Image (tube, rainbow, N blue to C red):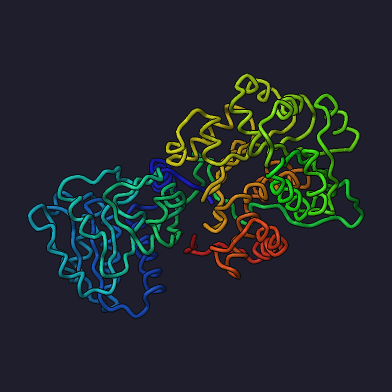
Amino acid sequence: MRVLTAQEMMNWERSTIANNKVTSSTLMETAGRAVVSQILDYYPRFTRCVILCGSGNNGGDGLVVARTLTTLHTKVLTFILAKDRHSLSHDCLHQLALFELSGGVVTWLSEHTSNSFLPALLSTDILVDALFGTGFSPPVMGWRADVIAQLSSPPCPVISIDIPSGLDPDRSSLPAVHIKANHTITFGTLKPCHLFFPSAASCGSIHLADIGLMGTPTESKVNTICPTDLPALTRQHDTHKYNYGHVLIIAGSLGMSGAAVMAAKAALATGAGLVTVMTDPKCVDVIASQVPAAMVMPYVDDLLIGTMIVDKKVTSVLMGPGLDKSEAAIAILKSLINVDVALILDGTALTLLAENKKLHAAFRCRTSPTILTPHTGEASRLLSESSENINLDPIVAVKALFDKLLASTIIKGARTVIATSDNAIWVNTTGNAGMATGGSGDVLSGMVASLIHQFGVVEGVKLGCYAHGLAGDLAAKVMGQLSLSPLDIIVYLPLAFAEITRRQRVYVPSLIETL
């Protein structure tokens, strides 16, 4: 599913109108009816509704909703945040005329009457927010900000059209003045504010409505991962373990051997043919007892790693979970740069890379795939950028990290963002807050190390992130988020893969989809 900025969305609408003989009024009518359909689905027994409309096209959508609900004999009180009709956009003015022809009446809200809608809220079942849409750039100023501030704790559910008024459609920031919705109904495709936190939390449940936009928006390369974007999870009958890859995991140290255990168990649970863990000699016995299906060995000299990788038919190397920041680790990292094998860097390996900037040029020259799996803090060190800026616009951050090191990049978070070598950005929407615990990232890196050989780098990375979050979601349904552990994610991986296959078979696009 494509993710568009406000400008890209506007261009798509203009292209549809210009090339397909579709009017903006027709798009607005369809949008308004989609909103009504969703309102009736979630609140089938409501009888009273307050609609707050702005002066632009978002207000026009709201007037379509008002007119449609009025024909259903719903009691609708409609307010327009404008001095008079002369300040309305062309399409909004057209919808006002249609509303008035149907017998509708509006109340104008101005600087001196900005709180006149408040008594109506005390006796309404729902509030429809149609003040500011994706064409608006925050912050809300002056008396209009006072109107929105009065809606900080409304006495009824709020349905926002397109985006909750006051949010920046293109960023995850949370302006001081904005509406917090129970449901947001947006059109055509998602915008960044719907996906990324904290702004996504103010959107409530997000419903995507098809309003008849035509063609494919070509400007954006950002997509959410859907089951149909993932490979078929099948195997040929006549195969053996080396068909599914040999994963070498360089991980673990005294006091942090669990990271290696979780990465190895995750690699095995995602179908790796063979897994070898190379670790601190003091951790060998502990890890071997915890992961009997894996081979476990102490570190070898960095000069011998390349030979060992070739001799053992290693197909991918994961380095970093639970490692010490030692000179030996730095030497191993340097030696791996020139080895012809897919390399996944996580945890300590990312820290070492951030602290040794002379290695960046060498990584850019690697001919084999490199995959980085940083959380926001690690990404900030690699980019010499603040964590706040990365959280504010993770799409820009993941692009920057890919361009800097020419490595497929996974920035982990509440919405994991992926930059891949096919020049695309992918946003994963599976997962939950129960996965915010030490070790979840180790599980993901082990999964990716396994899957990239079986399905290719791009497909393996997408599948790993989606299945990782989905396994966490399935586990949380059974045990709740509070008690969720990284090992639970591994336990639920078989069910996650089965669910992916089921979703691939039954997925049919609908008029309205829910995130």
> Which residue is outermost to the left?
112
Q: Is residue 448 left or right of residue 60?
A: right
Q: Residue at x 74, y 50 (%)?
A: 261
Q: Position of residue 73 (x, y in %)?
A: 26, 79
Describe residue 459's horizontal placement relative to residue 414 as left or right.
right
Q: Is residue 425 left or right of residue 488?
A: left
Q: Is residue 76 above or below residue 451?
A: below
148, 295: nearer the viewer: 295
Residue 266 locus on image (x, y percent): 73, 52
Q: Is residue 256 visible?
A: yes
- Identify the residue shown where x is 26% and y is 63%: 153
Most foreground residue, 509 or 337:
337
Q: Residue 323 placed where, x, y %?
A: 69, 37
Residue at figure coordinates x 43%, y 60% from the top left: 206
Does any portion of residue 367 appear in the rendered image? Answer: no
Closer-to-camera residue (210/365): 365
The image quadrant of residue 137 is top left
- The residue drawn where x is 45% and y is 59% is 208
- Viewer-side residue, 513 vs 311: 311
Q: Height in image: 43 above or below 394?
A: below
Report the side of 349 relative to 100 (left or right): right
Q: Please count the marks in the image.
A: 0
Indicate the position of residue 85 as horizontal and vertical percent values.
14, 54
